[in-house]
Image (cartoon, helix red, strand yellow):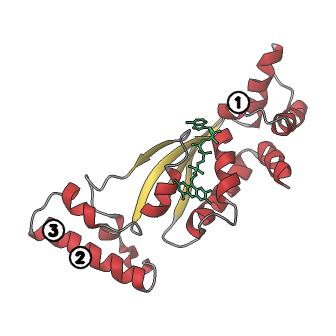
Amino acid sequence: MSERNIVKVINRYGSDGSIALAARISYGAKHVESERVGPIINGLIANKEGTPFEFASMWFYIRCSRLCHSQFLQYRHASRITRSTRRVDPIESESADLDKLPAGYEQTHIDYALRDYAFQTDELKIPREIARRILPMSILTEFYWLVNLRELMHFLDERLSNRAEQEIRDIAKRMELEFAGAFPITYMAWRGSNA
Ligand SMILES: Cc1cc2nc3c(=O)[nH]c(=O)nc-3n(C[C@H](O)[C@H](O)[C@H](O)COP(=O)(O)OP(=O)(O)OC[C@H]3O[C@@H](n4cnc5c(N)ncnc54)[C@H](O)[C@@H]3O)c2cc1C
């Protein structure tokens, strides 16, 4: 993953056990023995019963290009809050990461846009909400993404694929690792269903 991109887990809710518990309320169960969790989750995945996976979530912090961010917007069942260039300057304007700009034409293009943006806001005193219109899709943004496991698995199905663009695929790989660590039984069942 590029040094410009960051993926972190801020929080998580639920566990493999809470998913199994949610599923067993259909049978009146108020408790699930630990040895039953694996078979229940495998059954849910095999039968494509998605609702119990909505009872566990992960809250991610993601830093990526605005282009990549626009691809996250397509997932309508996740909650998202994004840094606003109406309120603050672009990340590149205030960080020491300028040397990590993508190489070549893209770097020149970002450099030019940031200088033009700074001229508009600092010299011409044009408000950020107007000046930001010239910023390219390749500059960074940051956002929180709260996603339940049903939607996360759908996202990973699509964005780990070779059809997905490199940037979001790299981010999806990092998210997959976090998913595997936090919900190992669900992760293995989902992986098995994709094998
Ligand atoms: C490789 C790739 C290329 C892409 N290229 C483009 C592109 O060129 N242009 C573009 O616009 N998008 C593109 N997309 C985005 C794609 O069209 C979907 O918007 C995105 O993948 C989210 O899928 P989704 O709608 O299933 O997800 P979600 O919005 O997360 O929905 C999850 C599931 O909920 C159900 N659902 C959600 N909303 C509704 C609804 N209104 N009615 C009925 N069921 C619903 C569906 O079963 C859906 O699969 C691309 C995606 C990929 C992976």
Mark sitting on residue 51: 1
Q: Residue furthest left?
A: 124
Question: Does dot 2 land on a helix, a strand or a loop?
Answer: helix
Q: Is residue 122 above or below residue 31?
A: below
- Identified at 52% across, 73% down, the residue is 3
Q: Which residue is mark 2?
A: 115
Of mark 1 and mark 3, the one earlier in the sequence is: 1
Quadrant where the C terminus sits is bottom right
Q: Quick one: label 2, few (<14), some, or many (20+) residues within 10 Å?
A: few
Question: Does dot 3 land on a helix, a strand or a loop?
Answer: helix
Quadrant of the rendered structure where residue 137 is? bottom left
Q: Amino acid at mark 3?
A: Gln
Locate residue 5 relative to residue 27 in the image: left or right. Answer: left
97, 122: nearer the viewer: 122
Locate residue 36 relative to residue 170 in the image: left or right. Answer: right
165, 171: nearer the viewer: 165
Q: Which x, y percent locates residue 8?
A: 55, 55
Q: Is residue 37 above or below residue 9?
A: above
Of mark 1 and mark 2, the one earlier in the sequence is: 1
Q: CA distance from mark 2 to mark 3?
A: 9 Å
